Image: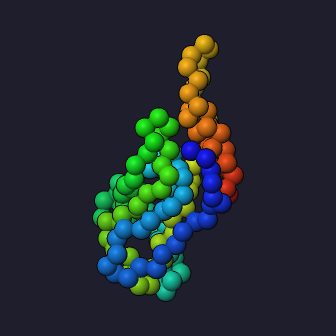
């Protein structure tokens, strides 16, 4: 899949009822997303946990490409709805690794090569970690 947009982190203001938040940028694994909830009153931030229990957990749903595991977008669903004094920040946290293994005289699918080329662009676009 071509990297066709310039990445920006997304943020949403809680309302005490909404638990699902859209993330419209490419990533490879559900663990590539970092979810932080910032309390605008107490000026504190909490990093949420993928698949975690209780109030600080969330899940990611979307449909990855079956050949590359690249998600074009997804929905982050919080276990508990953030309140009106909280801001949900979703950003990419793609690890700086190269997981594609190409074997000598093996198949060379275009999608695999394209995904390998997309990965460094996604890493370059995200905030410094």
Locate residue 57: give its quadrant: bottom left
Task: Identify the image quadrant of the N terminus.
Answer: top right
| x then y, percent, for residue 82 | 38, 76
Is residue 45 visible in the rendered image? The answer is no
Identified at 38% across, 82% down, the residue is 15
> Does residue 33 appear in the picture of this structure?
yes
Q: Position of residue 69 (x, y in %)?
A: 47, 40
View extreme (top): residue:
105
Q: Which of 7/48 is in front?
A: 7
Residue 49: x and y in percent read 41, 58
Task: Please give the name of the residue rendered at 31% of the width and 79% of the height, measured from the top-left corner.
Answer: 17
Judge whether 123 appears above or below 58 on screen. above
Relative vertical location of residue 106 with respect to residue 87 in this rendering, above or below = above
Residue at x 62% of width, y 50% of height: 3
The scheme the figure's colours follow is: rainbow
Q: Which residue is more in the foreground, 46 or 17?
A: 17
Please count the marks in the image. 0
Closer-to-camera residue (83/28):
28
Write the residue at 53% across / 81% down. 43
Question: In this orientation, which residue lies closer to the viewer: 7 or 36?
Answer: 7
Quadrant housing the C terminus: bottom right
Where residue 4 appears, as percent x and y from the top left, is 63, 54
């Amino acid at each position: 899949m071509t990297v066709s947009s310039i990445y920006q982190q997304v943020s949403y203001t809680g309302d005490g009822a909404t638990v699902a938040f859209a993330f419209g940028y490419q990533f490879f694994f559900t663990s590539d997303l970092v979810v932080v909830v910032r309390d605008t009153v107490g000026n504190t931030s909490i990093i949420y946990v993928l698949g975690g229990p209780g109030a600080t957990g969330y899940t990611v749903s979307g449909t990855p490409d079956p050949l590359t595991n690249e998600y074009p977008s997804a929905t982050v669903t919080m276990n508990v709805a953030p309140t009106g004094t909280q801001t949900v920040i979703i950003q990419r946290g793609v690890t700086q690794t190269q997981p594609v293994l190409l074997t000598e005289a093996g198949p060379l699918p275009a999608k695999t090569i394209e995904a390998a080329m997309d990965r460094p662009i996604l890493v370059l676009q995200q905030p410094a970690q």
